Image (cartoon, rainbow, N blue to C red):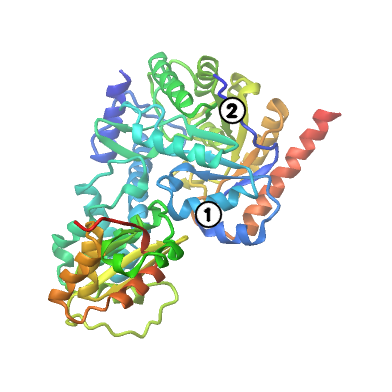
Amino acid sequence: MLHDELSHFAQAIVHGHMPSPRIRQAYADYSAETALGVYRNNYRGNLHDALAGAYPVIKQLVGDDFFRFLARQYIEQHPSRSANLHHFGLELAGFIATFEPAKELVYLPDVAALEWACHVAYFADDGDVLDLNALAQVPPERYPDLVLHTHPSCHVVRSHYPIAAIWHAHQPGASEDFHIDLDGGPGYALVSRKDDIVQVSELTEAEAVWLQGIQAGARLGDATVTTLEHYPDFDLQATLLKLVAQNTLANFNLEKTP
Amino acid sequence: MNGPATNTLPSAAGIGLRAPHYREVLDTLPALGWVEVHSENFFGGGAPLHTLFRVREHYPVSLHGVGLGLASVTPLDAGHLSALARLCADVQPAAVSEHLCWSAADGMVINDLLPFPYTREALDHVARRVDQVQERLQRQLLVENLSSYLSFSRSEMTEGEFLAELTKRTGCGILFDVENLYVNARNLGVDADAFIKAIPAAAVKEYHLAGYSMRDGCLVDTHDHPIYPEVWDLYESVLRHIGPRPTLIEWDTDIPELAVLMGEAAKARQRLEAVEECHAA
C-alpha cells in the first residue's frame, strides 16, 4: 500500500530506520545507502537553512559550527510540522533556554525570541495606516476615549538584557566596535514593519507597560492613568511620536465613556 | 478540467526570481519574458507580497509550489491550500505549478520533494488531489516531473506514463523539468526518449532548466550550477519533439549575480527562437 511504503520511507529519512525492501537496491553509479543519505542530508539541511534564515543574529553570536550543532539537536526534538518552512523554528527560544551547552550565553533565548518576532513581523499582514488627519479632528476632551489599534506586525519582547542593542550590533553594516552592558537592567524591544523593512527599537519600561495596555484594548485615558500611577515620568506625547514614526499604530476608534 | 483562469505565460525565457535579486530586478527591469517564484515564500502576505505586487506590474508571474505534497498520504493541507488560493486571487498568476511528489506521512513532514512508486493506487490518489486543488483554485495546475535518487520495485508504470494518465484524468498540465529527466536518466536509468514520447505534447505548458551537482556518484538536483551541455542537448531534443514553451532558468543555492542568470536565459531564448523559426518555416 502507498501509505505503508511512504511511511517506511519517511521513518528512514527522519529516524534513520532501514528503508523498505521495496526500494530498489542497485543503481548504476551509487548504492541505495548513498541515495538515502542524500535525502537525509536534504531533510536536515533544509531545516538548518530555514533556522539560519530566521535566526541570523543567533548564528553570528554562536558561530556557524555551534549553530549547526544546535540546529541538529533542535531538529531532533522539534521536527517540522508544516510544509511551509517559514513556520519552522517557533520553539527555538524555549529550546535554547534549556540547551546546556549554551547556558553561559544568558541573553541568547531572549535574542532568539526577538528574532522570531522579527521573522513573524516580516510575514505579518499589512495594517491600516494611521489616519493622522482623522486623529487631528478628534476633540481633545475625547482623547481619553481613543482606542488605538496596533499594526499586525507590532510585538514587544521583554528581557533582562539589552536585546535590542545586541540585535542592532549584529545587523549588516553595523560597526564592529560596540559595547553592551549586560547588567544595564531589563530591556524592551519593540518590533514592527514599515513597508518591507522590519524595525527594532528600544522602549522604556513605562512605554512597554502603556503599549501592553493599549494592545489589550484599553482606552487611551485608562492606559495612561494606569501607567502614570507606576511611572510618574511617563511621557505620552513622546511615546505616541515614537510609535507613529515606527508605523506601530494602525488605526483608532472612539469608545463611549462608560 | 480547464478552469476559468488559463495559463498565459509567454513562450519566452524567464528566471526563478529569488530574494537576493528582488531589488536589482525592480531597479533595472531587465528584459525577461517572465519570472517564477516559490509560492510559499509569499504565504501570509507581508513584506514579500509587497515586492511581488511590484514585480507583477512589470512581468508575468508564475507561482511554483514546493510544499503542497500532491502524493502525500496525509489529507491535503487545508491551510496550505487556502494560502495558495489567496495568493492566486491576489497575484493573478500566469501559471500555477506543483511537483509530482510527496512530503508528509504519519505526522512526519519532510520539507523536500520525495518520489513514490508509480502504481494505479498512487494514480487514483494523486488524481483525486489534483482535482481538489484545481477545483479550489479554479484553474489548471501544472504538475512537474521529479528528480529522484531512488526508485521503487513496485512501480507499475513509468513517471512519463503516470503523468500522461494524470493529465488525461484531471486536465492538469505538465511542467517538464528537462534537468530532472536528465538526472533520472543518469541516476535511475530512466529512458529519456521514452519519457518524451510518453507525455502528451499538448499538455506541456512550461520547461525548467537548472544545474545539478554530484555526490558519491549520485546526481543531486541542487540548482547551484550553470546548465550543463548535456542538459542543453536534451533541451534541444525536447524542443524538436514537443515544441517551444515558456522556459525557466532555476538557481536556488549559491545564487550568482543576476547577469549570470540573464546569460543562461539568453541561451535558452536562442534555442527557443531557433526552433520557433523551424516551426514557422
Query: Which label is found at residue B51?
Result: 1
Task: Name the one closer to the observer, A53 or A153.
Answer: A153
Q: Is residue B138 above or below residue A99?
A: above
Q: Residue at 44% of width from left, 39% of height from top?
A: B66
Task: Name the one closer to the observer, B245 or B129.
Answer: B129
Q: Position of residue B139 (x, y in %)?
A: 54, 27
Amino acid at dot 1: Thr
Horizontal arrangement in the rendering, residue A231 relative to residue B30 (left or right): left
* Element class at badge 1: helix
Q: If the image is split into quadrants, where does the C terminus of chain B sit?
A: top right
Q: Position of residue B74 (x, y in %)?
A: 30, 27
Residue A106 appears anywhere in the view: no
Q: Position of residue B187 (x, y in %)?
A: 48, 34
Label 2, on which residue? B192
Q: Quadrant of residue B113?
A: top left
Q: Is residue B156 above or below residue A183?
A: above
Q: Nearer the viewer, mark 2 or mark 1?
A: 1
Q: Quadrant of residue B174?
A: top right
Horizontal arrangement in the rendering, residue A44 relative to residue A95 (left or right): right
| Chain under disc 2 | B
**Which class describes the residues within 10 Å of circle 2: few (<14), some (14-19), or many (20+)?**
some
